[in-house]
Image: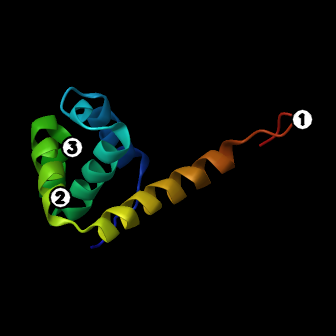
């Protein structure tokens, strides 16, 4: 599976999905992993754009990803998300002097 960069734009879509009624059908971590996996599985920019513009489309694609992916692939996506977000958080940590 080709894991795309977890850009702010993609992460905003994943966060919106997790917060939506559709995303709340599963725990937040599971919804986030499979929503991002769905974005990664999009074969073209046009296909990915459809997922960004419709929570229903993203939900269907997340369920499909959940049905098709192995546990190892899901763990790989989860690790990518955690690594990326961990790096972003680390870059924003302020020191006691107030300097990043």
Residue holding disc 2: 65
Residue at image location 24% in from the left, 68% down from the top = 70
Residue 8 image position (x, y, % from top left): 43, 46
Q: Is residue 57 above or below residue 39?
A: above
* Secondary structure beneath label 2: helix
The Cα–Cα distance between marks 2 and 3, rounded to whole angstroms, is 16 Å
Q: Nearer the viewer, residue 61 or 27?
A: 27
Quadrant where the N terminus sits is: bottom left
Residue 97: which numbered mark, if any? 1
Residue 72: which numbered mark, if any? none
Between marks 1 and 2 in the image, the one whose residue lies nearer the viewer:
2
Residue 46 in view: no
Mark 2 or mark 3, earlier in chain:
3
Residue holding disc 3: 52
Q: How many marks?
A: 3
Q: Nearer the viewer, residue 100 or 22?
A: 22
Mark 3 or mark 1, earlier in chain:
3
């Amino acid at each position: 599976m080709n894991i795309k960069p977890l850009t702010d734009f993609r992460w905003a879509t994943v966060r919106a999905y997790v917060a939506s009624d559709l995303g709340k059908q599963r725990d937040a971590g599971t919804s986030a992993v499979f929503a991002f996996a769905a974005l990664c599985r999009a074969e073209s920019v046009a296909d990915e754009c459809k997922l960004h513009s419709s929570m229903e489309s993203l939900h269907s694609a997340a369920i499909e990803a959940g049905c098709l992916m192995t546990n190892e692939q899901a763990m790989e996506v989860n690790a990518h998300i955690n690594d990326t977000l961990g790096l972003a958080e680390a870059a924003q940590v302020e020191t006691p002097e107030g300097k990043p």
